[in-house]
Amino acid sequence: MNWKQVSLAATPPQAWRNGGGVTRELLAWPDAVDWRVRISVADVQRDGPFSRFDGLERWFAVLQGEGVVLRIGGEEHRLTRTSEPLRFDGAAAVDCSLLAGATQDFNLMAPPGRARLRRVRGRMDFNAGGQRLLALYAHDAPAALVMDGETTQVAPYHLAWSLADTASAGTVASDDALWMEVTR
């Protein structure tokens, strides 16, 4: 399988309209204008609302900083670097409060019910069905992906992604990474 890799440092930041932070878009698939899947890293610098993305599901994970409290539909979700990723409706009104200063956060957006995001700390086995976009983001530590007898190394602050046509099984090993599967 052919894995493409994108560096966070080589991805230019885009300022938010509300001035609360910047986003680095690592992947917009199938293209930047009419994307169905978007993977990005955001630097959140102050409290405030999230942008709405009607018709999409969002996954959110804290990468750096003390964390956030997200208020969604009357519920509060406290998220830190050790929390599992949170999934929520992209159309929901979301208010974000920083726990103790700026954070860096990971975002995956896809059609509802078609994506999955998991933290990897150690070793994780996976079995992915066919017709999937597979992706691995290595944050503070490198990651190794073993699939179909081949090993792909992913350096810290890089996203590796590929389109799988057939079912795949493998292993991811890292001290700080995120694994994604999105049905196409």
Image (spheres, grey):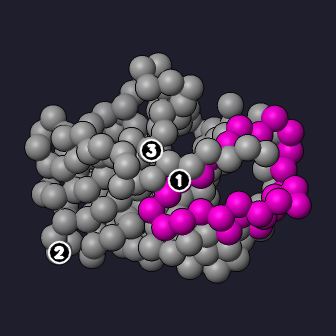
x and y, in percent, of residue 142 in the image: 56, 72
Q: Which mark is residue 100?
A: 2
Q: 10 Å neighbourhood of mark 3: few (<14), some, or many (≥20)?
A: many
Q: 10 Å neighbourhood of mark 2: few (<14), some, or many (≥20)?
A: few
Q: Circles 1 and 3: CB distance less than 8 Å?
A: yes
Report if residue 92 lies within the magenta region: no
Q: Distance between the residues labelled 1 and 2?
A: 27 Å
**Helix, strand or loop at disc 3?**
strand
Which residue is the site of mark 3?
A: 26
Q: Is residue 118 visible?
A: no
Residue at image coords 31%, 34%: 52
Q: Distance between the residues labelled 1 and 3?
A: 7 Å
Q: Which amino acid does label 2 sit on?
A: Ala
Q: Which amino acid does label 1 sit on?
A: Leu
Q: Is residue 96 above or below residue 113?
A: below
Which residue is the site of mark 1?
A: 159
Residue at image coords 45%, 53%: 7
Identify the magenta region: 144-171
x and y, in percent, of residue 46 in the image: 13, 57
x and y, in percent, of residue 132 in the image: 72, 39
Q: Which mark is residue 181?
A: none
Instruction: Indicate which label's residue lies in the foreground, 1 or 2.
Output: 1
Q: Circles 3 and 2: CB distance less than 8 Å?
A: no
Considering only order in the chain, which callout, 3 or 1, is on the residue closer to the N terminus? 3
Considering only order in the chain, which callout, 2 or 3, is on the residue closer to the N terminus? 3
Residue at image coords 14%, 49%: 20
Instruction: Indicate which label's residue lies in the foreground, 3 or 2.
Output: 3
Considering only order in the chain, which callout, 2 or 1, is on the residue closer to the N terminus? 2
Overall secondary structure of the magenta stretch? Answer: strand
